Image: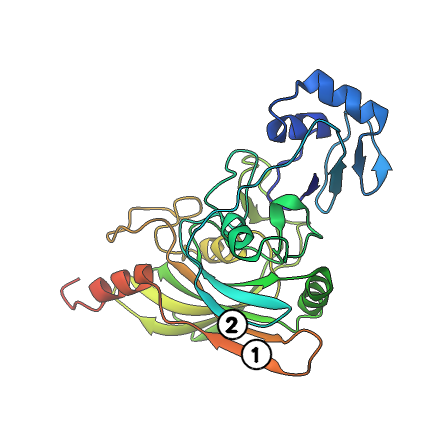
Amino acid sequence: MKLLIDEITEEKRIDAYLADYMQDFSRSKIQAEIKKGAVLVNSKSVKPSYIIKEGDLIEVTLQDFKTFIPAEDIPLEIIWEDENMLVVNKPSGMLTHPTAIETTGTLVNALLYKYENNLSDINGDFRRGIIHRLDRNTSGLLMIAKNNEAHKYLVEKMKQREIEKKYLALVKGIIEEDNFTINKPIGRNPKQPHKMCVLEGGKESISEIRVLERFKTATLVEIKLITGRTHQIRVHMASIGHPVYNDTLYGFGKMKIKTEEQVLQSYKLKFPKPFDNEIISLEIPKDEKICKVLEVLNDTSF
């Protein structure tokens, strides 16, 4: 089993972290196996007390433990595809990949059914094909790698900022400026580890905002991500007093129009086709959450 540690994993000991995934094994059994060298972090042995960090790749080689992520016949909306990758329209409400608690119903479960082993595995068994992610309740365009070479290529292009991702968001209140940039560092909230926040000493985080339409109580914006931090859009918009509509984690105050969590969609994607000079530009229509809120906001009586 391979597990990649990312930004949203709360810092904890490796034995406790693995106990969440390997529930058929006691924590003492896991500790014993770690001491035997059956668990490696970045190809090196560690102690059971090792504190996992972002970017760590954990490899578990217990003989009597097998990772099982079921392939599930879940419909996939494929927007673009070639021999190396595909782009899907992830629906709101779907996890991008399994976790220790939820191992079914995710995008990875659906991908395994359709593509079996024809997915990259650089980021571990729970993230087959996954290059980047969208929050559970954010819908939209997501790139998937079919092999490790394409995965590495696309990750490098993201690091070089050659992949352009744009989002639609409905935010609370009226934004006066037409175009502006939010450049505020983001890190884990020290008081609420499940949340991120603007934090001195955090990672550089840049979002470019363009106002598309103003309403009496809300603003429709397009947001271009220059960096890709966890919850970046939601944290940045809340930090300027304009949280994403119905974002219960970072929002504040009651919203008059109810939807399933944040009204946020990844709707434009531009990227270089792997191993080719062709630039692929994709755009999808507004999703049903955005359309629902816009319909009410366009009512002059609102």
Camera-side residue of 58 and 63: 63
Q: Are marks 2 and 1 in contact (CB under 8 Å)?
A: yes
Gap between marks 2 and 1 measured at Cα: 9 Å
**Which quadrant would the N terminus be assigned to in this image?**
top right
- The disc placed on residue 186 is none
Q: Nearer the viewer, mark 2 or mark 1?
A: 2
Residue visible at 69% across and 70% down in the picture:
157
Which quadrant is the C terminus positioned in?
bottom left
Mark carried by residue 280: 1
* Percent of width and height locating residue 111: 53, 54
Q: The residue under label 2 is which amino acid type?
A: Trp
The residue lying furthest to the left in this view is 301
Give the mark nearer the N terminus: 2 vs 1: 2
Quadrant in the picture for residue 207:
bottom right
Q: Which residue is mark 2?
A: 80
Measured as percent of width and height from the top left, residue 251 is found at 40, 48
Up/down of 211 relative to 76, above or below = below
**In the picture shown, does residue 79 fall above or below 101?**
below
Let me know if residue 187 appears in the view.
no
Q: Residues within 10 Å of mark 2 (few under 14, many from 20)?
A: some
Residue at horizontal 75%, vertical 38%?
Answer: 59
Q: Image height check: is 300 above or below 98?
A: below
Q: Secondary structure at mark 2?
A: strand
